[in-house]
Image: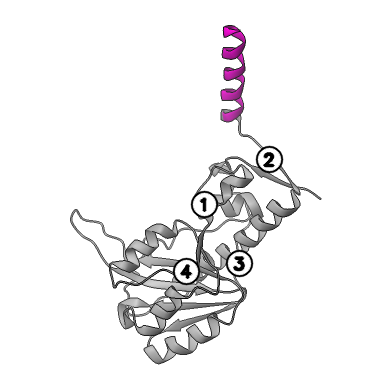
Amino acid sequence: MRKIIYSKFDKKAISLLPPVSFSGRIITILSEGEAEKAVDYLLSSKILGVDTETRPAFHKGESHKVSLLQVANHDTCFLFRLNRIGMCPPIIRLLEDTTVPKIGLSWHDDLLSLHRRTAFVPGFFIDLQDIVGLLGIKDMSLQKLYANIFHEKISKRQRLTNWDADVLNEKQQVYAAIDAWACVNLYEEISRLMKTKDYDLIANEEEKQDTDNNKIALSSNS
């Protein structure tokens, strides 16, 4: 059965979708030793999803360093508490690795945040925003992309919570894990659709109207 995707997914329809669930392992990393073992494990994977979280700023002039780096393969996500362990050598090794593709979304912004903690040379990263346009999709947010491709809802309720908290609660952990893990799913499905062409793209009404107006304008000028 061919997949139906949309050039722009209706934001109102997202609330009607079933929620995404992550049934894999979530492991919090609180020391350099733990980070070393986690990075060894992660770099044995064929593909990884990546994301970061930063404590939100609610006042003018207020800013915070990136608090969390989450990295996932198909069934395990590690939460590196950067506010506790900093950019230790194992994390630098992970970020500079050139052998395993690491998939993010708006990852250019995440790299800038990580660079504010310490300098490093980025390794093998792929930003979903650089490839979704090849399918004709114009949405750039993780929530809309996942809803469009998989017809499931990623909740964003935890986004503005305190990522510098002494202990991340279960909802924060699951939220962070899903954001990294979802990038793996999206990349693999987008790659499959690009290869098989097994999809139909539907333009939204606004784009249809723009196309009709362009046709009318061209007809009037001919």
Answer with mark 4 or mark 3, whichever residue precedes in sequence.
3
The label on residue 24 is: none
Point 45% across, 70% down: residue: 123
- Give, as a single range, the part of the protein colored magenta: 207-222
Front-lying residue, 148 or 193: 193
* Residue carrying label 3: 21
Point 62% across, 63% down: residue: 185
Instruction: Please state which of the two labelled residues, at mark 2 or mark 4, is closer to the viewer.
Output: 2
Point 31% across, 67% down: residue: 115
* Residue carrying label 2: 201
* Residue carrying label 4: 176
Answer with mark 2 or mark 1, whichever residue precedes in sequence.
1
Instruction: Please state which of the two labelled residues, at mark 3 or mark 1, is closer to the viewer.
Output: 1
Cα distance between the residues tagged 2 and 4? 30 Å
Cα distance between the residues tagged 4 and 3? 12 Å
Picture coordinates of residue 72 (x, y %)?
54, 73
